[in-house]
Image: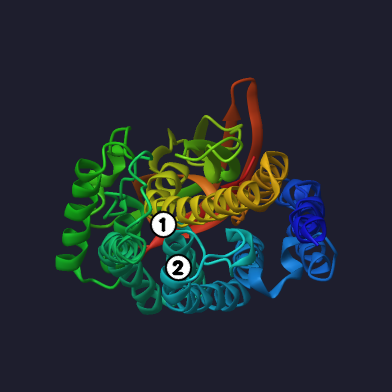
Amino acid sequence: MTRVKFLHPLILAIALPFALASCASSPRIYSQIDSQVQAGSHEQALASLNSRRGTRGSVYRSARNDILFYLDRGMIKHFAGMYMESFNDLHNAERLIEEAFTRSLTQDIGALLLNDTVRDYQGENYEDLYINVFNALNFHAMGNIEAALVEIRRMNEKLVVFADRYERVARRMLDSNQNIDTGHIPMEASRFSNSALSRYLGMLFYRAIGNMDSARIDYQELIRAFALAPEVYTHPIPSSVHDELAIPAGQGRLNIIAFTGLGPLKEETHIFVPLPFAFPNDWTRIALPVMVDRPQSINRVEVVLDSGERFNLELLEDMSAVARETFRNTYSLTVIRSTIRAITRTTAAAVGAHAAREGAGEGVGLLVGLFGRIFSEAAERADTRISRFFPARALVGGINLPPGSYTITVNFFGFSGLVESQSIVKEVREHTLNLARFVCLR
């Protein structure tokens, strides 16, 4: 009877890794879509992404990952110029992020799950923020500046509440599990509370509708953003920003914004925590996600006008740095949740091993403890889900020009020379927003 009872952990330990592996998504699933997006083949990328909706092994197949599906599809549609369709997908993602956070409050505080991958994906903070940036750009492209400003204001409001709301959840989780020590792992909330990209767009949009007081406020907030987050804004404020509110009479202001590269992905890392139990339950392994930047091909962006002017765009916002910085808030919750889960499992294994030693001898106790450790390690996996198609960097520039039609060529350079060149014809007019956007995600 004792032998049958202690076979259960062995069966679980053997079966669990295979069950978890069947739920995992191979990076190869996304390589085709990534390549198509980087090449600017947006229709093919959309077809590939939609086909993954029903593909086994694809993250898009599960309803738990609807947020990822809408984020990725919405961004590809934005790059494809499908602005209303992009808004619908990104808006759906935003709504689901808010719903998922509300649902997770009781889950995070009261329940210990197998691992974070079985939870609904809630979205990263930076994804929730940049939804509003790209929906603002969607509305601008559709000629609705007022709606674009609503999106910018939504982003600014989110930045105010993010840090506080995650701190409150973390405190409640710790209060509910006071016997669990997380002091061995440093946890620090993000101090990012103002986005230069959001303020830049707000300044342009307010200027476009003639609200110069609000435009000046956003200009001042842009300057303040650099001062508040030096770990994100390690570069100078773009020089053209200072000229945005002083356009000479009889001229129009041409603004250029370019997005380059692709934002970070997540990888799994491990932390080992010693525990006061007998071998083999004298330590436990905690699996945690870390953000890793993707390689960037573009290091300079040049604008050339057919009228003879040329200038380089300057970095306004390192969006990958914002992703890493705002990740601090959710990372703290992940540390707490993972630590509670791993220590609880290892403690249960140690208690079971002790009982087995008392009832069946040292050998059986050691076996039960070993199976418990195998089970705990196999079950503990980091949640490495993340959207794939937010850009890595936003660069800007501006120039005052006589009204008229201009051919704008934007050259994207890498370390070995020209990578890509894009041209459009743009009508520059007085007293309006002449904003041209370019994207090179290599």
Label 2 crowd bin: few (<14), some (14–19), many (20+), radius 10 Å: some
Q: Quadrant of the C terminus?
A: top right
- Where residue 267 sits: x, y (%)? 60, 42
Res. 150 in view: yes
Residue at point 54%, 41% (across, down): 284
Is residue 209 left or right of 352 when viewed as pictured?
A: left
Which mark is drawn over residue 333?
A: 1
Q: Quadrant of the N terminus?
A: bottom right
Is residue 103 left or right of 157 when viewed as pictured?
A: right
What residue type is disc 1 on?
Answer: Leu
Depth check: 431 or 88 in front?
88
Dot 2 or dot 1: first in sequence order is: 2
Question: Is label 2 in a helix, a strand or a loop?
Answer: helix
- Where residue 397 sits: x, y (%)? 39, 44
Cα–Cα span, label 2 and label 1: 8 Å
Depth check: 72 or 168 in front?
168
Question: Up-down: is 60 above or below 357?
Answer: below
Which mark is drawn over residue 273?
A: none
- Where residue 275 sits: x, y (%)? 46, 39
The part of the image, by quadrant, that contains residue 268 is: top right
Question: Up-down: is 361 above or below 152?
Answer: above
Res. 407 in view: no
Label 1 crowd bin: few (<14), some (14–19), many (20+), radius 10 Å: many
Q: Which residue is mark 2?
A: 108
What residue type is disc 2 on?
Answer: Asp
Tell me whether circle 2 and circle 1 mark residues in contact (CB < 8 Å).
Answer: yes
- Where residue 9 sits: x, y (%)? 74, 55
Question: Is label 1 in a helix, a strand or a loop?
Answer: helix
Residue at point 85%, 65% (across, down): 55
